[in-house]
Amino acid sequence: TYIKYNLYADKDVSIRIINLHGQVVKVLLKGSQIEGTYTVQWDGTNLAGQETKQGVYLLLIETHEGVITEKLIRIK
């Protein structure tokens, strides 16, 4: 899954995948980025590099201004 996002100013960004229990499944990005358009990829694996199960996950894109949440459905 490719996730495209835009930053309209330089910011600290955190992009995480969490399960419906609120547990972090994968951290895709954590750091500072300059203004621009970016793409990150989630390959369906968890923090240990193991393939995740089918189901619903949440994508969180967080900056100091707030959080954007999107639902992801994992189908094998």
Image (spheres, helix red, strand yellow):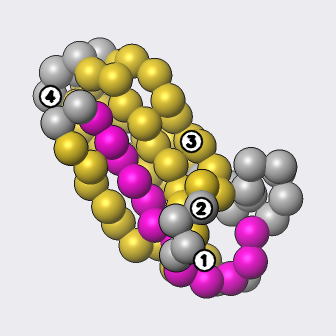
Q: Hey, what amino acid is under mark 3? A: Leu
- Marked residue nearer the N-terminal end (2 or 4): 4
The segment highlighted magenta reads 52-63
Q: Which residue is mark 2?
A: 23
Which residue is found at the position 27% from the left and 49% from the top? Answer: 67
Q: Which residue is mark 4?
A: 8
Q: Which residue is mark 3?
A: 28
Judge whether residue 60 is colored magenta: yes
Q: Position of residue 34 (x, y in %)?
A: 29, 16
Q: Hey, what amino acid is under mark 1? A: Arg
**28 vs 52: above or below:** above
**67 vs 12: above or below:** below
- Marked residue nearer the N-terminal end (3 or 2): 2
Question: Given this view, does label 3 or label 4 mark the residue nearer the observer?
Answer: 3
- Marked residue nearer the N-terminal end (1 or 3): 3
- In terms of depth relative to the viewer, which is nearer, 63 or 40? 63
- Marked residue nearer the N-terminal end (3 or 4): 4
